[in-house]
Image (cartoon, helix red, strand yellow):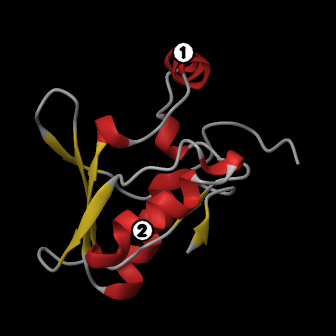
Amino acid sequence: MRDATRGGVATVLNEIARAAGVTVVVDEEAVPVRPAVRGAAELLGIDPLYVACEGRFVAVVAPEAADAALAALRAHPLGEQAAIIGRVDADPAELVLLRTRFGGTRIMDLLVGDPLPRIC
């Protein structure tokens, strides 16, 4: 489990993939991004997956426990938007792949620099 406050979801997933020597495959459509955040990110020309997500975390859960973990998170008022956003694969190692809403696949690499200045 990792906090997505610094570096956003993409950075957390890259750190996990590299530390564990696995590939993380993310379904872009499954990632819950509020419409206001998506709109602001589009106006600023940044990817919301790289923006700090205060109060959010990423958990890697065994496939057989995923549904139970999701139900437990959604049972709490602060976890209503919890979602299964992808899966872990063995090959190719140490990558994060994003299955886009248009049906393609792209590599989500570590962010270079900060898309927004720190406010805290």
Q: Residue 38's x, y, as percent?
A: 51, 23
- Which residue of the protein is positioned furthest toward the right in this rendering? 120
Q: Residue 65's x, y, as percent?
A: 36, 76
Of the 4 image quadrants, the one containing the N terminus is bottom right
Pointer 2: residues within 10 angstroms few (<14), some, or many (20+)? few
Amino acid at circle 2 = Ala
Visible residue check, residue 90: yes
What residue is shown at x 50% (from left), y 54% (from top)? 9
Q: Above or below — where is 92 with respect to 51?
A: below
**60 left or right, relative to 95:** right
Quickly name the residue at label 2.
68
**24 left or right, relative to 77:** left
Of the image marks 1 and 2, the number of the one nearer the N terminus: 1
The Cα–Cα distance between marks 1 and 2, rounded to whole angstroms, is: 32 Å
Residue 117 image-quadrant placement? top right
Where residue 28 is drawn, which disc sits there? none
Q: Above or below — where is 104 with respect to 56?
A: above
Q: Above or below — where is 39 with respect to 99?
A: above
Name the element at disc 1: helix
What residue is shown at x 43% (from left), y 59% (from top)? 110
Amino acid at circle 1 = Gly
Is residue 82 or residue 16 the one in the foreground?
A: 82
What residue is shown at x 56% (from left), y 27% (from top)? 34
Residue 7 image-quadrant placement? bottom right
Visible residue check, residue 111: no
- Which residue of the protein is positioned furthest toward the bottom in this rendering? 20
Pointer 1: residues within 10 angstroms few (<14), some, or many (20+)? few
Q: Residue 92's x, y, as percent?
A: 13, 73
What residue is shown at x 45% (from left), y 54% (from top)? 10
Is residue 80 or residue 101 the one in the foreground?
A: 80
Quickly name the residue at label 1.
39
Name the element at disc 2: helix
